Image: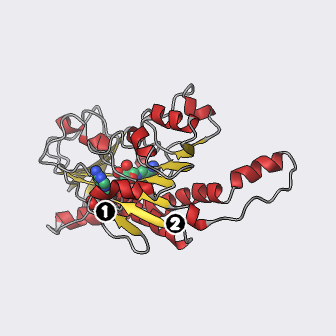
Amino acid sequence: MEIVFASRHESNPLEWVRALQAALPDHRVRLWDDEEPSGRADAAVVWAPPAGLFDREPGLKYLFNLGAGVDALLHMPGLSDRITLVRMEDGGMAVQMAEYVLHYLIRESRDLGRYAAQQAQARWQPLADIDRSAWTVGVMGAGVMGARVAQACAALEYPVAVWSRSGRPVAGTESFGRDGLADFLARTRVLVNVLPLTGDTRGILCRSLFQQLRPDAYLINIARGDHLVAEDLLACLDEGRLRGAALDAFSQEPLPPDHPFWHDARIQVTPHVAGASLMDLTVRQIAGKIDAVAQGQPITGIVDRARQY
Ligand SMILES: NC(=O)c1ccc[n+]([C@@H]2O[C@H](COP(=O)([O-])OP(=O)(O)OC[C@H]3O[C@@H](n4cnc5c(N)ncnc54)[C@H](OP(=O)(O)O)[C@@H]3O)[C@@H](O)[C@H]2O)c1
């Protein structure tokens, strides 16, 4: 097969081409060239690919995304239904997502932010012991990321519930299906969003949802910026309905310098780094799938266009 690597965001695309080529000795891997597309590529490995890719590579049959979320790809003009879209499944991201969530969960539940403030005043003041039953975690999404996050929180004995379309069970947690959203929210204090961004989930993190959480709730959004209605978050923080939020993804990235999130002490901002796909694991996974399709074998991680994930 001929495989083209196309990304507008990768700082060192040649390193990816070399790694993919080394893992795929029976195939030809090349870097996308705006000036000289070959027009013969069978597959593309992409992250934010250039707009001209589909027009100029009309033979593409497979698109392998370097990330788990395919929302941006699905909206690209020219993406034909004939192309099979394949997403990353874990690729080293899930354990990082779990670390990220544990960091903020522990920071809140163990008062570590308050101890940092006390240190700045040289103040020795033990705060109340943790009451784990008061720190109920609710994870939206029971997929590769959501399940790993939920299990990590449950391993530290936080009471964890998971909400998904199908109510897919995750060991050691309470599962809620689509119709169980109200019950899921009513028991949740720390809400973690790891849903894919789809027509159903855009804007889901909004005032009416925050109002159904337990009092003094905390939001961790590690999925997409467009899940969140920013003004509803700020209003709910002002009203004391939410105590704070950790946000990794934003509607506009990079987050503009004048955005209110930057300067709000109740909000922790990180630059979309909660779970990075690591080159070794990513290349190994994608190369394995390319070898499989070249041999006519089935692969996992194919995006269902109707569900949008
Ligand atoms: N910030 C970062 O660095 C970063 C890194 C990686 C991923 N992400 C984000 O994380 C998302 C999830 O990744 P993943 O690999 O875990 O995806 P996944 O394996 O496809 O899992 C998606 C989960 O969401 C559930 N879901 C989808 N639509 C729903 C709806 N309308 N209502 C309720 N549940 C719904 C699915 O339910 P079913 O189980 O019933 O199908 C499934 O449990 C990605 O799409 C991406 O946006 C962010």
**Badge 2 residue CB within 8 Å of ligand 1:** no
Looking at this view, is 307 or 181 the one in front? 181
Q: Amino acid at mark 2?
A: Cys
Circle 2 residue: 153
Residue at the farthest top position: 258
Q: Secondary structure at mark 2?
A: helix
Percent of width and height locating residue 182 = 36, 53
Q: Left or right: 146 with respect to 259?
A: left
Circle nearer the viewer, 1 or 2: 2
Percent of width and height locating residue 19 = 40, 58
Disc nearer the start of the sequence (1/2) = 2
Q: Left or right: 21 with respect to 156?
A: left
Q: Amino acid at mark 1?
A: Ala
Looking at the picture, does residue 100 appear above or below residue 242? Answer: below
Looking at the picture, does residue 202 appear above or below residue 152? Answer: above
Real-space CA distance between mark 1 and mark 2, rounded to the nearest whole angstrom: 32 Å
Circle 1 residue: 287
